[in-house]
Amino acid sequence: MAMGKAPGSGEDEGGDGVFAEINITPLTDIFLVLLIIFMVTSTVIVQQGPGGGAQAGLKVNLPSGAATDVKARTSDLSVAILSDGRLVLSGNVVSADELKAAFAKAQAQNPQTMVIVQADEGVPHGKVVEVMESAKAAGLAQLAIGVRDPGH
């Protein structure tokens, strides 16, 4: 470097200026600190959940594989959903509107009526949910899913 030239003035023999190489170490440190902060806060948010307490974020209590027997009462309704989506109530094929009317009538007679939904394996999940939502909308809160005995 020659005398009288300011360092970094761009007049060096190599032609490299002051900013020829950027040090990214501080930038990397900042990103790592931010990553750690986001990781810690996201786990706290998931544990607390949107409602906090018992409604904790992603905690799901999955049912075990063993089904318990439910004693069906004479007042309970058994709804079968066939593989083609048809609804069967008490041995009769019914429409969705007729099923809703039957739910409303059953709720008026006995609010403790249980709805047992027996769906074919090929029935889409959404169809089962529709039947359960219809029962709940009519005021029938006791719902059960009918399954076959694994031993048979």
Image (spheres, rainbow, N blue to C red):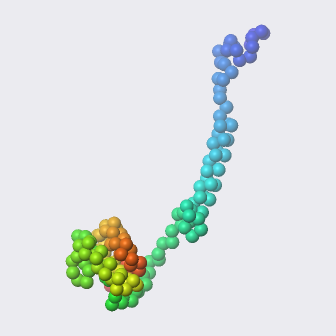
Residue 95 in the figure: left or right of residue 50: left
Quarter holding the N terminus is: top right
What is the residue that sits farthest to the left in this orientation? 93
Q: Position of residue 83 (x, y in %)?
A: 25, 72
Q: Is residue 132 visible?
A: no
**Residue 42 at least partly seen:** yes
Q: Quadrant of residue 78?
A: bottom left
Relative to 24, say whether 80 is above or below.
below
Q: Position of residue 55 (x, y in %)?
A: 55, 67
Q: Image quarter for residue 126?
A: bottom left
Image vertical order of residue 43 relative to residue 132, above or below: above
Q: Residue at x 39, y 89 (%)?
A: 71
Instruction: Give whichever of 41, 76 is nearer the camera.
Output: 76
**Residue at the farthest front position:** 108
Screen quadrant of the C terminus: bottom left
Which residue is pictured at 31% across the width and 81% down the height?
105
* Residue in the image at 41% along x and 78% along y: 141
Numbered disc total: 0
Q: Is residue 37 left or right of residue 103?
A: right
The residue drawn where x is 36% and y is 75% is 138
Looking at the image, is 135 positioned above or below residue 10?
A: below
The spot of residue 130 in percent (x, y) is: 33, 69
Front residue of 10 and 69 = 69
Relative image position of residue 139 (x, y in whole percent): 39, 77
